[in-house]
Image (cartoon, rainbow, N blue to C red):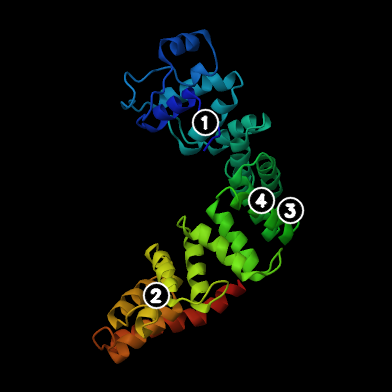
Amino acid sequence: MRGTNRSWTNLGRAYLFGVILSGAIGLGTEGRLDAEQGVPEAQGLSTLSPQAGESIEEDKAEAVKRYRLAADKGDVEAQFNLGIAYYYGEGVKEDKAEAARWYRLAAEQGDGDAQLYLGSAYCFGEGVNKDMAEAAKWWRLAADQGNASAQFNLGCSYYSGEGVNEDKAESVKWSRLAAEQGDAKAQFNLGHAYYYGEGVKEDKAEAARWYRLAAEQGDVKAQFSLGHAYYFGEGVNEDMAEAVKWWRLAAEQGDATAQFNLGYTYYYGEGVKEDKAEAVKWWRLAAEQGDVKAQLSLGSAYFWGEGVKEDKAEAAKWWRLAVEQWLIKPILKLK
C-alpha cells in the first residue's frame, strides 16, 4: 500500500493483523530502547520477533497503543495506520469518525495514502458528511503525488461529473496516469474511452490494447470486453476461440453477460465444439443472476429439450421470470 517499508510499520501491521514475517525485519534491542526514549518511528512497534520468519502473536490492542504514541507526536505513518485501525475496528472499537480524524491529520502533512482514504471517506460519507467536492479535492492532492488509486478515482469523478465539472478529456488524462502504473480498473476505463471515443479519438485497436492489459490482471469487465472485441473483430482480428477464452474467464468470475455469451457459443458451436448441455449450464448460471436473455434461452432449452430433459413447466417458469423483468424494470426506472 505504501511507498516506504519502514520496519516499525511492518511490525505494527504484524501486531495488527497477525501476519508472518518473511524477512529479517525487526527493531531489536536498540529499537526497544528508542521506544522507551520516545522516538516516534520506534514506537510504531517495539517488540521484536525472536527469529526472522517466525509469527508474531496477534496483539491488535498493543499495535494501536504503539501507533497512538507515535501519532500523538505527529508521525504521519502512525496517524494513517491509526486511522486504518479505527476504520476496521482492529485493536480498538470501530469508529469511522475517528478514522477520518486521523486520516486528516496525516493528509494535512501530505501523506498520499491518507489523502486517498480521506477522499474516500467523503465519497461514501463514512465518518464525515458525504461531499464529492471534498472527495475530489483530497484525491487530487494524492493523485498529484502519483497515487494510482487516487488518479483512478479522480478520473471517475471527471467522467461522471461528481464533485467536479464533467470533463471526459480530463477523465482520460487521470485514467491514463493510473493505467500506466498498472491499475487494472483504470486500464479498463481507458479502453472504454478509446472504444467509445469519449475524451479521446475513437480507436478500437487502442481500446483492445488497454482491455488486454486489464484482462490479464483478472479484471472481469476487461475480460468480457476483450472477448467482445475478438467476437466482432473490433481492434483485433476476429477470433471466436479467443472470444470464448476471455468470456470463459469472465464467466468463471460470475459475470452474467459473459455466462450468457459463453452459453451461446456452446449452443451454436462458435469457437468451441457444440455442446447443448454446456450451453444450458452457463445459461442457468446467468439466468439465476437475473439475466433476461439467459432466462429466455434457458426456457427455450427446456421447452425443446435441448441440452436438458424437456419440461414445459420449467420452460414456462423461466420465461415468466424474463417477462416479469421486462414489465417491472421500466417501472423501477421511473422512480
Q: Earlier in the sequence, mark 1 or mark 2?
A: 1
- Element assignment for label 3: loop
Q: Which residue is mark 2?
A: 262
Residue kind at label 2, given as amino acid type: Leu
Q: Amino acid at mark 4?
A: Leu
Residue 50 % position (x, y): 32, 18
For the point 47% across and 64% down, which residue is it? 223
Distance (Cα) linking label 3 and label 1? 29 Å
Element at label 4: helix
Which residue is at the far left? 309
Where's residue 178, x and y in %?
61, 50
Q: Tell me the residue that label 3 is attached to.
A: 164
* Residue 181 appears left or right of 219: right
Q: What amino acid does circle 1 point to?
A: Asn
Estimate the x, y position of residue 211 in percent, counting from the top left: 54, 63
Question: Rounded to the nearest whole Å, what is the CA distance between mark 2 and mark 4?
Answer: 34 Å
Q: CA distance from mark 1 to mark 4?
A: 23 Å
Residue at the image point whose x is 43% and y is 70% from the top: 247
How many other residues sit within 10 Å of disc 3, few (<14), some (14-19) or many (≥20)? some
In front: mark 1 or mark 4? Answer: 4
- Residue 81: image tag: 1
